Image (cartoon, rainbow, N blue to C red):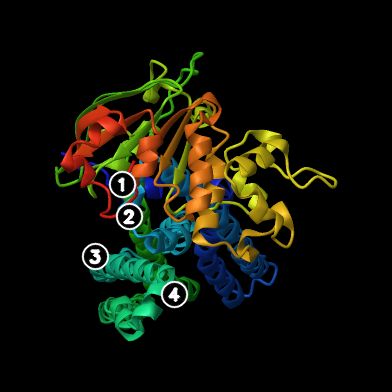
């Protein structure tokens, strides 16, 4: 009964195929080189016999020189094919992983530290991309030893048996190396990814670490796994050194055994001098099975890296629906929506909520009530575990991605600004030409200008060195200004704005202007606003009060304010209605 191939093995086979024509060419070149390598001892032997017999017209010396030239050419072309094939396969693998991560559920990406994912994408993808050349060269490297067994058997069966026995011992030694080295390499890559994840966390929170004066403690936390990493690294090198030493010892002994057997056969008259020369060369080829060790080590690294990349690839992606969005004004409806954590704890538990078209609904509740999760499923940042979310009567799962992203805009409390310039960051969700900075003297496209004004960030951009063309890395933005850029990016959405605590870092005056713009209709769009402020809730048409993952009430703010539990949701001393 066969075993089911693992994700790593399936991915490895795909990577081999991704090498494309370069991998095929490498295989052809490597086979040509192996054939020349096997033919060379025979040609040398025949050249010796011709010289001993006084046949000066024989062409075997020229044939031997031609075979040496073929070996030189195949080595050079093989290196070229290895480089190009590896580069092509690595690029395709990185694109595949990136596409999958962007298409996967947001919760899937959060399972892995960003630094760990970067390590898989950069370092381990490069290791896995070498699978094609490693497999091809590994298989072809077996041909000279096996061909040597056949050639020696044809010359003298006793020579073939001697070489075969030695090769069997070398095979056992290398199999043990592959098994032990696989665990060492996988452990090394895992710990390296953990260190990279902690390092990125520390760099992201550098200001907090400096303010808390915990630099030494944080350095120790980041490098805590360094002894384990060192252990795996030393183990890998020890295994390689041990296997190399064993094959290095067995190889010469195997050659001596074949030469001794050949010498006896020569004295017994079973061999000619030329056949003995060929037998010595074939013995050297056969003993060269130990040279496969380097290729095996590369294949072990490729397989371990493929296993690391296969982990995030194993998570399902959100499939695009086939349907366009029909005419409508943005009615949002959640039907018995349930979301659970990996350990089964409910985050949203049977939420039924209707947000009328064009209305503003504030979402409030204590910390951990499920507010951000509700905002995420409202725009299909991820799908609920059960239940359904509909926009204008169409389940979000059924909508085409482009239609959904045109219709729904998200703004967050800590937005990630994506793009090269400020214009790119605001125009990220805009279609085609509207997202690109205009040619000529215009500072920005009309759509970007309108979004910046609506988010009260146009004056901030005007003060930047190059306005909308200022590079983000050169833009000295405060937390509130970054939030406003995030709001501007979401503003062009056609039917539904989802604001997840997106004004928490703004000053009171700016927040009031934005809240008034959002509350005054937002261009006729529906608005779902996660907030901790009573003033924002009071400005909404309705308030969705979440508690423990359930919808406790849906009513106007003034009606709910009579409930002391509702008032306790807002910070003591906060703004009253």
Which numbered disc, 1 or 2, marks the residue that appears first in the sequence? 1
Q: Which mark is residue 176?
A: none
- From mark 4 to mark 3, how far is it between C-alphas? 38 Å
Label 1 packing within 10 angstroms: few (<14), some (14-19), many (20+): some
Q: Nearer the viewer, mark 1 or mark 3?
A: 1
Residue 40 in the image: x percent, y percent? 55, 66
Name the residue nearer the viewer: 195 or 438: 438
Residue 236 in the image: x percent, y percent? 30, 76
Disc 4 is placed on an element classified as: helix
Q: Which residue is mark 3?
A: 179
- From mark 2 to mark 3, how far is it between C-alphas? 15 Å
Name the residue nearer the viewer: 505 or 24: 505
Disc 1 is placed on an element classified as: helix
Q: Nearer the viewer, mark 1 or mark 4?
A: 1
- From mark 1 to mark 3, how far is it between C-alphas? 18 Å
Label 3 packing within 10 angstroms: few (<14), some (14-19), many (20+): few
Disc 3 is placed on an element classified as: helix
Left/right placement of residue 428 relative to residue 552 reads right
Q: Which mark is residue 276?
A: 4
Which numbered disc, 4 or 3, marks the residue that appears first in the sequence? 3
Left/right placement of residue 333 relative to residue 412 reads left
Up the image or down, 555 lies above or below 155; here it is above
Tally the marks: 4
């Amino acid at each position: 009964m066969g075993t089911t191939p693992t994700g790593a093995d399936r991915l490895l086979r795909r990577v081999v195929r991704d090498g494309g024509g370069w991998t095929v060419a490498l295989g052809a070149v490597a086979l040509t080189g192996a054939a020349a390598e096997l033919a060379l001892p025979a040609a040398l032997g025949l050249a010796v016999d011709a010289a001993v017999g006084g046949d000066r017209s024989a062409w075997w010396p020229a044939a031997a020189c031609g075979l040496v030239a073929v070996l030189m050419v195949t080595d050079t072309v093989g290196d070229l094919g290895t480089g190009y094939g590896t580069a092509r396969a690595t690029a395709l693998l990185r694109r595949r992983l990136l596409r999958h991560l962007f298409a996967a559920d947001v919760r899937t990406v959060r399972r892995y530290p960003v630094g760990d994912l970067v390590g898989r994408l950069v370092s381990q993808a490069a290791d896995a991309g070498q699978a094609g050349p490693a497999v091809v060269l590994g298989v072809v490297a077996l041909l000279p030893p096996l061909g040597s067994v056949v050639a020696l058997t044809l010359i003298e069966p006793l020579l073939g048996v001697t070489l075969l026995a030695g090769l069997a011992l070398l095979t056992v030694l290398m199999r043990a190396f592959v098994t032990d080295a696989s665990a060492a390499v996988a452990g090394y890559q895992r710990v390296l990814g953990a260190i990279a994840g902690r390092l990125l966390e520390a760099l992201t929170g550098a200001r907090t670490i400096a303010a808390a004066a915990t630099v030494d403690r944080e350095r120790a936390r980041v490098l805590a796994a360094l002894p384990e990493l060192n252990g795996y690294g030393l183990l890998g090198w020890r295994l390689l050194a041990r296997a190399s030493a064993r094959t290095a010892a067995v190889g010469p002994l195997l050659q001596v055994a074949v030469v001794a057997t050949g010498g006896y056969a020569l004295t017994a008259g079973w061999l000619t001098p030329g056949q003995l020369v060929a037998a010595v060369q074939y013995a050297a080829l056969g003993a060269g099975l130990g040279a496969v060790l380097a290729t095996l080590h590369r294949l072990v690294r490729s397989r371990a890296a493929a296993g690391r990349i296969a982990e995030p690839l194993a998570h399902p992606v959100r499939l695009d629906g086939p349907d366009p969005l029909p005419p409508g004004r943005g009615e949002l409806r959640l039907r018995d929506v349930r979301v659970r954590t990996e350990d089964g704890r409910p985050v949203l538990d049977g939420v039924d909520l209707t947000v009328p078209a064009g209305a503003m609904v504030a979402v409030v509740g204590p910390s951990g009530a499920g507010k951000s999760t509700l905002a995420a499923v409202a725009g299909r940042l991820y799908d609920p575990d059960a239940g359904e979310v509909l926009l204008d009567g169409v389940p979000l799962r059924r909508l085409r991605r482009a239609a959904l992203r045109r219709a729904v805009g998200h703004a967050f409390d800590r937005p990630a600004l994506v793009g090269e310039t400020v214009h790119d960051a605001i125009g990220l969700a805009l279609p085609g030409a509207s997202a690109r900075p205009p040619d000529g003297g215009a500072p920005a496209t009309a759509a970007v200008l309108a979004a910046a004004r609506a988010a009260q960030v146009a004056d901030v951009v005007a003060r930047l060195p190059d306005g909308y063309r200022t590079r983000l890395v050169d833009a000295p933005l405060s937390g509130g200004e970054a939030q406003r850029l995030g709001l501007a990016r979401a503003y062009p959405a056609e039917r539904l704005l989802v604001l997840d605590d997106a004004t928490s870092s703004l000053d009171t005056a700016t927040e009031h202007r934005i809240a008034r713009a959002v509350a005054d209709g937002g261009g006729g769009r529906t608005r779902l606003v996660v907030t901790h402020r009573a003033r924002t809730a009071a400005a909404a048409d309705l308030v969705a009060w979440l508690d423990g993952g359930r919808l406790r009430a849906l009513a106007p703010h003034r009606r709910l304010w009579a409930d002391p539990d509702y008032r306790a949701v807002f910070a003591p001393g906060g703004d009253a209605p």
